[in-house]
Image: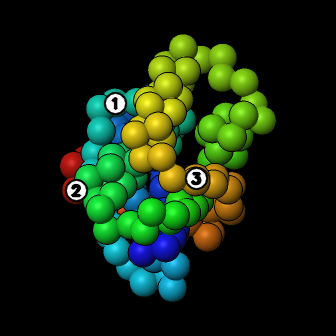
Amino acid sequence: MNALNIFTDGGARGNPGPAAIGVYISDEKNKKIAGFGRTIEISTNNVAEYKAVIEALDWIIENKKALAENAKIHFFLDSRLVCSQIIGIFKVKNVALKDLLLDVRDREGQICLPMFYKHIPREQNAIADAFVNEALDNTT
């Protein structure tokens, strides 16, 4: 595969509250490669958003052999805050989020492929959002 499109979402019912992550991964032709959601510990929306990105990065690490040496990774997030923090537009002031950003950077370093992060409207992130809601609906 020459490219991955990764849509991530995180959400909490209550803030903080029961939380879940959702990840949808497709190839450069938008063919589904993977999609999943799962609950995480009680957390905030922003923590859940970061954990979704981390979960996607872990998936890449586990499946890296299937990627071309020059593959590009495109992340799409509906959280403007988290996306802007990851690409360095916004500073990270919250200690918990700083630690999660370090986790993101650590995994990016293990992958060693070009990564691009883009903020998208919530409507364009419906599949990852559905994984979040399905995980939460099945546990609450």
Residue 18, percent from left and from top: 34, 37
* Labels 3 and 1: the sequence-earlier one: 1
Image mark for residue 138: 2
Task: Decide: is 101 above or below 81.
Answer: above
For the residue marked with disc 3, what is the amino acid? Met
Residue 48, percent from left and from top: 44, 39
Residue at x-position 29% and y-position 62%: 65
**Label 3, label 1: how many angstroms apart (C-alpha)?**
29 Å
- Assess disc 3: are there few (<14), some (14-19) or many (≥20) residues with their C-alpha within 10 Å of its C-alpha: some
Q: Would you say residue 111 is visible in this rendering?
A: yes
Q: Nearer the viewer, mark 3 or mark 1?
A: 3
Q: Residue tagged by mark 3?
A: 115
For the residue marked with disc 2, what is the amino acid? Asn
For the residue marked with disc 1, what is the amino acid? Ile
Q: Nearer the viewer, residue 57 or 136?
A: 57
Residue at x-position 48% and y-position 41%: 108
Image mark for residue 42: 1
